[in-house]
Image (cartoon, rainbow, N blue to C red):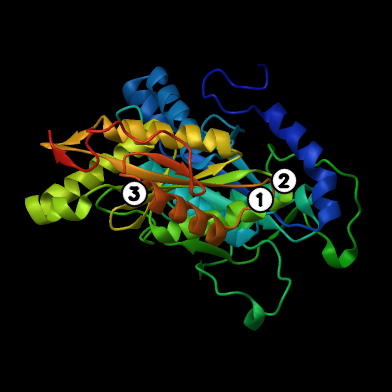
């Protein structure tokens, strides 16, 4: 496909322009905000000089794949080492939270056998502007430059516009930093001839509002399992719910619980339990090509964007089978899995979690090591005599 770059597997600049044009009128008509993430791979030039261009291309492919597979974000390559992610319907807060999740999940695992970090800049348009905000890309670039200047491996959000008084704004997870100056970047397309009112004018050259920085130490990664945390799930689900409503996307939630985990801790000790958790998280990630979130001591969740019930069940069954084929030392792993799918445009985490946990309870009541969908059997239970809890291999 010509719109896909062979090197990275990301969409091309031409595909970005086409999507901006296609969504332009819908965003303006709905009055929804729009957020933009610009991700730059840190020190890619040094990687190319040290290990060769092919290795640098492997890093780019790995970053693009992690965006697609773990977070279901569709990256567009706009520069040699930079990608753009669009969040129609997402505000600055949602963009900043997703940027920090993406940044953290890239650094926790090597890519192409190398430690890789990214810097991320975020900007958002006020409601009703959408992609017609001609300085949106410039402000995202300004935030990215701030992330680079602060030492890289950082996500920085740049406030697009003030629509309510300071005291009336929702609580922010961001800390104000100093003013930066931006210029309109070459990669950002101006797709409209709209003449904004004087009070709304978005200048091409200006002193920007104060950017804000998400601290790298924010607890979005679980240190033990290298999965993301419950807080990260809440962030991601809020962004997904807004995007699902805006774009009419289907979504699903998978909840996987390790069978017999309490017995493992009691019989073999906490170290064995920790090994089980680490192995389970790794298997969930690799088998489902998705990002696991650790929501309870021995429970993981996976969010799927654009997946209906049938596809979500397929991912859940792959996760179950992959975990069942793994072992942690002398222990054979087993999981029970519950799945809840939402109709297009209707995703709500509280509702999906309630239904997925009910399905999970049904799977455990049926003996474990099986998948259930919204409380109904979606896969045959294990054959009689098959192991249903963790056991010594």
Q: Image point 52% across, 52% down: which residue?
A: 98
**Other-residue count near label 3 (Cα within 10 Å), few / some / many at <14 / 14–19 / ≥20:** many
Query: Where 141 falls versus 97 (above or below)?
Result: above
Q: Which residue is mark 2?
A: 247
- Which of pointers 3 and 1 lies earlier in the amino acid sequence? 1
Q: Image point 49% across, 62% down: which residue?
A: 213
Horizontal side of 274 relative to 252 (left or right) equals left
Where in the figure is residue 230, as x and y percent of width and height? 40, 59
Q: Which residue is mark 1?
A: 243
Q: Which residue is mark 3?
A: 364
**Other-residue count near label 2 (Cα within 10 Å), few / some / many at <14 / 14–19 / ≥20:** some
Q: Is residue 329 visible?
A: no
Where in the figure is residue 264, as x and y percent of width and height? 15, 50
**Other-residue count near label 1 (Cα within 10 Å), few / some / many at <14 / 14–19 / ≥20:** many
Q: Nearer the viewer, mark 3 or mark 2?
A: 3
Q: Nearer the viewer, mark 3 or mark 1?
A: 3
Q: CA distance from mark 3 to mark 2?
A: 35 Å
Label 2 element class = helix
Label 3 element class = helix
Q: For the N terminus, which image quadrant?
A: top right
The one nearer the camera, 8 or 22, is 22
Tell me whether the residue at label 1 lies in contact with that at label 2, contact meaning CB atoms closer than 8 angstroms: yes
Query: Where 46 falls versus 168 (above or below)?
Result: above
- Which of pointers 3 and 2 lies earlier in the amino acid sequence? 2
The one nearer the camera, 339 or 358, is 358
Label 1 element class = helix
Q: Image point 12% across, 33% down: which residue?
A: 393
């Amino acid at each position: 496909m010509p719109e896909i770059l062979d090197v990275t597997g990301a969409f091309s600049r031409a595909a970005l322009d086409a999507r901006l044009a296609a969504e332009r009128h819908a965003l303006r008509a709905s009055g929804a905000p729009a957020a933009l993430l610009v991700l730059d791979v840190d020190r890619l030039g040094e990687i190319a000089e040290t290990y060769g261009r092919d290795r640098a291309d492997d890093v780019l492919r790995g970053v693009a794949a992690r965006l697609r597979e773990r977070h279901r974000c569709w990256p567009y390559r706009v520069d040699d080492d930079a990608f753009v992610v669009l969040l129609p319907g997402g505000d600055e807060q949602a963009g900043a939270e997703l940027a920090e999740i993406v940044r953290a999940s890239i650094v926790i695992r090597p890519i192409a056998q190398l430690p890789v970090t990214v810097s991320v800049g975020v900007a958002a348009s006020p409601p009703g502007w959408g992609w017609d905000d001609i300085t949106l890309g410039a402000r995202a670039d300004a935030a990215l430059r701030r992330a680079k200047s602060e030492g890289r491996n950082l996500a920085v959000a740049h406030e697009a516009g003030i629509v309510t008084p300071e005291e009336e704004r929702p609580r922010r997870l961001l800390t104000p930093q100093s003013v930066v100056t931006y210029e309109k970047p070459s990669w950002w397309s101006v797709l409209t001839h709209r003449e904004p009112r004087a009070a709304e004018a978005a200048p091409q050259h200006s002193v920007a509002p104060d950017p804000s920085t998400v601290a790298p130490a924010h607890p979005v990664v679980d240190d033990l399992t290298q999965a993301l945390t419950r807080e990260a799930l809440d962030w991601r689900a809020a962004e997904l719910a807004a995007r699902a409503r805006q774009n009419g996307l289907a979504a699903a939630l998978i909840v996987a619980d390790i069978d017999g985990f309490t017995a493992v801790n009691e019989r073999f000790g906490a170290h064995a339990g920790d090994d089980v958790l680490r192995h389970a998280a790794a298997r969930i990630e690799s088998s489902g090509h998705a990002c696991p979130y650790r929501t309870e001591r021995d429970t993981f969740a996976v969010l799927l964007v654009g997946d209906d019930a049938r596809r979500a069940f397929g991912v859940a069954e792959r996760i179950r089978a992959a975990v069942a084929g793994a072992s942690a030392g002398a222990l054979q792993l087993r999981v029970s899995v519950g799945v809840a799918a939402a109709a297009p445009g209707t995703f709500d985490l509280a509702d999906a979690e309630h239904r997925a946990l009910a399905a999970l309870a049904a799977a455990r009541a049926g003996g474990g090591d099986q998948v259930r969908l919204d409380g109904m059997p979606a896969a045959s239970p294990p054959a009689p005599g098959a192991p249903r809890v963790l056991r010594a291999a």
